[in-house]
Amino acid sequence: MIPIISFIGSSGSGKTTLLEKVVTELKKRGIRVAVIKHSHHNDLAFDKNGKDSQRYTTAGAEVVIVSAPQEIVFMKKTDHDLSPNEIARLIDPDIDLVLTEGFKSAGTLKIEVHRKVLASELLAKPDQLLAVITDEQLDIQVPQFDVMQNNTAEIADLIEQWLSSQPKREIEKVTK
């Protein structure tokens, strides 16, 4: 199983900006990262009306993959809102780490971005947290980083340390 950490927080807390910086830092360190964004919207931009991908979906395709020289978009019909673990099974086996934005209800380890003005309490329980990025000192026994500081390297250090403590995965190589 690919290790997963979910970045959670109230809307407008800075999750996307932080996650973007952390991905950049981890990539510099040679860690291969996949990002899954959780959305409650059913109108994702790549499946626009009139596009081939939308036409195939409408026609009843269970899976639609759009391939371009620099990327692919993978779309699969589901009968429920997939968990991060279910989604991770669809990802390239050479990925070292999956970081998600959202999935606050999932049973994954979390880094919470907390701003006092947006939420009076944390969204996650303390035993679910790897760290909290916050604008106030909290009475919680997990690493806390000041939301106003650029702590990207320190957050990446914490993630890298956690990642190194995870069991090594057996990766099946597909040969041609």
Image (spheres, helix red, strand yellow):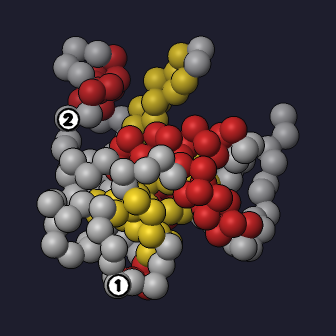
Q: Position of residue 56 (x, y in %)?
A: 33, 26
Query: Dividing the image into 4 quarters, which one contains the C terminus?
Result: top right
**Circle 1 SS class:** loop
Q: Residue at x 34, y 84 (%)?
A: 139
Q: Residues within 10 Å of mark 1 (few under 14, many from 20)?
A: few
Residue that carries the numbered disc 2 in the rendered image: 43
| Left or right of residue 43: residue 130 | right
Is 41 located above or below residue 133 in the figure? above
**Which mark, by number, is residue 15?**
none
Instruction: Choose between 129 and 3: the one closer to the eye.
Output: 129
Amino acid type, label 1: Asp
Q: Position of residue 90 (x, y in %)?
A: 54, 50
Q: Residue at x 50, y 62 (%)?
A: 5
Sequence-earlier tag: 2 or 1? 2
Q: Position of residue 42 (x, y in %)?
A: 20, 42
Circles 2 and 1: CB distance less than 8 Å? no
Is 80 located above or below residue 30 in the figure? below
| Left or right of residue 48: residue 24 | right
Disc nearest the viewer among 2 and 1: 1
**Circle 2 SS class:** loop
Is 169 located above or below residue 50 in the figure? below
| Left or right of residue 152: residue 126 | left
Is 74 located above or below residue 95 in the figure? above
Amino acid type, label 2: Asp
Residue that carries the numbered disc 1 in the rendered image: 139
Q: Report the Cα–Cα distance between label 2 and label 1.
A: 40 Å
Q: Position of residue 146 (x, y in %)?
A: 40, 59
Query: Dividing the image into 4 quarters, which one contains the N terminus?
Result: bottom right
